[in-house]
Amino acid sequence: MRKVYLIDDSIISPLGFSTQENFQNLQENNIGIKEVDNNDIWSAPFYGSVVDNTKLNEAWNSISNDKNGDYSKLEKMMILSVSKLLSNNPSLDISRCGIVISTTKGNIGEIRKEQNDKAYLGSIAKTIQGYFDLEQTPKVLSNACISGGLALAIGKRMIQAQLFDDVIVIGGDLLSEFTLSGFFSFQAVSAAPCKPFCKNRTGISLGEAAASAWLSADKNKINGEVISISGDASANDANHISGPSRTGEGLYISITKALKEANLRSEQIDYITAHGTATPFNDEMEAIAFNRAGLQEVPLNSLKGYYGHTLGASALIESIIARHCLLNNELIASVGFEELGVSQPVNVITKNESKKLTRVLKTASGFGGCNVALIIEKLA
Amino acid sequence: MEKFYISDFCSLRNNRVFKNGEKIYYDVTSESIKDFAKGLYKSLDLKYPKFHKMDELCKLGFLATEVLISHMEDVDQDTALVLSNRASSLDTDRKHQVSIDDRANFYPSPAVFVYTLPNIIMGEISIKNKLKSENAFFISEHFDPEFIANYSQVLLQTGKASNVICGWVDLDNDKYDVFLAFLSKKGKKELTKKELNNLYNQ
């Protein structure tokens, strides 16, 4: 079966409006989470990671070919990330690409309005189709917190099945009153920036971001070292709709199947970029699954301490960063971590480190009991 | 290339339930989706207390699955779920929104919020049928037989799934439309976008 390569990517987040800027901020351990005082999201200050509206509108005005159109914040972020990907890659013809959009809640804030067509997730696909003048409507995937990783897996599968030679995966979600209030009701929001895998973790920080990644079957499009998605799998826990499995069942199955497809053993993995939401149950479940898979000694981080949980964007952004860790041979510290707070050992990265990296495991888990694992590999 | 088939299919529309083209249930009295779902649940003789906690969208997807597989002894745990709809979970999203509209009278509930994601339907189906399989939930303006058939075929061909339950589970403003198909290596109707579209439109 043909190989699928990650060619290029673009991130729009509080840590920057390009992948390069984002990666530089991670190398300097700068975090996007700060105290947010925005009555539209919540009546009291809280910790989260939000994209500055002024900065976004400036960037939007400098690239937009449709200044009079009606675009939501999320649509601007998504279109901006795709536009940057296209302008950096003149050979990328978006009209010939398959497009998968990953989002959990899209423009959900719009349901507060009487006229709320934009609250329908499909409206984002229509907006992107219109902006880039595409014949086909992009596909929208909404699969809870694994959406961004699953969208990459789906893009890879579409290329392998020869439905397309190139796929653009776009992911994005906003930090909204809707989502924040829901996580409040679960008492799952941390009062301070979140602390994945730490003994002192008390819950998530939410974030917002958009990103896009270009997947291709054509190795010749690569400028530099070759990065491939060499294995992927997703599995349901079949256990509980809001609580992760106590045995890490679905995640364990996902990891095992992804390794098998990539024809790798667990000891060949150099780095794990985990889901690490910093809720007590999630991180514990992941530690159990990693131990079952024999991955307890592999250096691991969660980027949630930098970005917060960006929902439909998170696993996509974390996969993009994984690609750049491979290219730079660099491990990024798992910010917020002080002391191990899970019952099974995991090797949390406490400071940045230069290290030869060849293979990364990316995982994500979400409500509905869903899990995904991707193997991202540097090929010689 | 290996061939795959639509072994069984079913639909829930206008208080009627069809399986493989035959009407198997009709409810003349129920005026709400909740009552229709309750009646169908009883007629299927299910004993599954978790059903009563589900939101309406999940009830519809859950019941359709029970109808689809009712004649099977068991379903392989690698049977993937590939579902789609137009309105995502907006029916329950609106309920959550009502609970947070007024910050002075603020009562969001985790039991409601958890249903504000469309893939929860697949979580419920997976728990009931012990499916530790691939799940994907897509959003489109209308049922997209071409993409759903293509993607399901990819899962079957690559061995990522042994069978696939695919279809459309949509609920918006008290209107619902549910269609599911069971895809496997056995059957008389070959899996094509045309066949899937025909069965959806029956």
Image (cartoon, coloured by chain):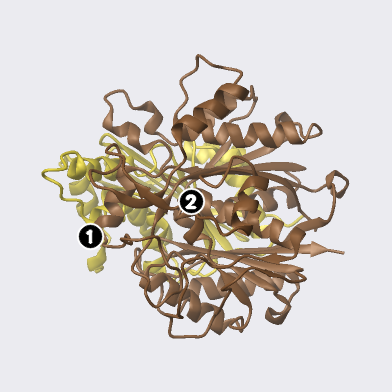
Chain colours: A brown, B yellow
From the image, tell me which residue sits under label 2.
Answer: A32
Please provide percent x and percent y for residue A99.
Answer: 63, 39
Q: Residues within 10 Å of mark 1 (few under 14, many from 20)?
A: few
Please provide percent x and percent y for residue B201.
Answer: 47, 35
- Label 2 secondary element: loop
A206 vs B86: above or below: below
One can see residue A102 in this view = no
Q: Nearer the viewer, mark 2 or mark 1?
A: 2
From the image, tell me which residue sits under label 1.
Answer: B53
In-image side of A135 versus A175 (left or right): right
Chain for disc number 2: A
B106 vs A69: above or below: below
Q: Nearer the viewer, residue A360 or A59?
A: A59
In-image side of A371 versus A362 (left or right): left
What's the residue at 74%, 42% (across, down)? A166
Chain for disc number 1: B
**The quadrant where residue A67 appears:** top right
**The quadrant where residue A87 appears:** top right
Please provide percent x and percent y for residue B130.
Answer: 43, 71
Position of the N terminus of chain B, as image quadrant, is bottom right
Question: Which residue type carries mark 1?
Answer: Lys
What's the residue at 64%, 42% (across, down)? A18
Q: Residues within 10 Å of mark 2 (few under 14, many from 20)?
A: many
Question: Which residue type carries mark 2?
Answer: Gly
Q: Nearer the viewer, residue B183 or A212?
A: A212
In-image side of B90 versus B185 (left or right): left
In-image side of B144 versus A83 (left or right): left
Q: Nearer the viewer, residue A51 or B90?
A: A51
Please give the label number shown on residue A359: none
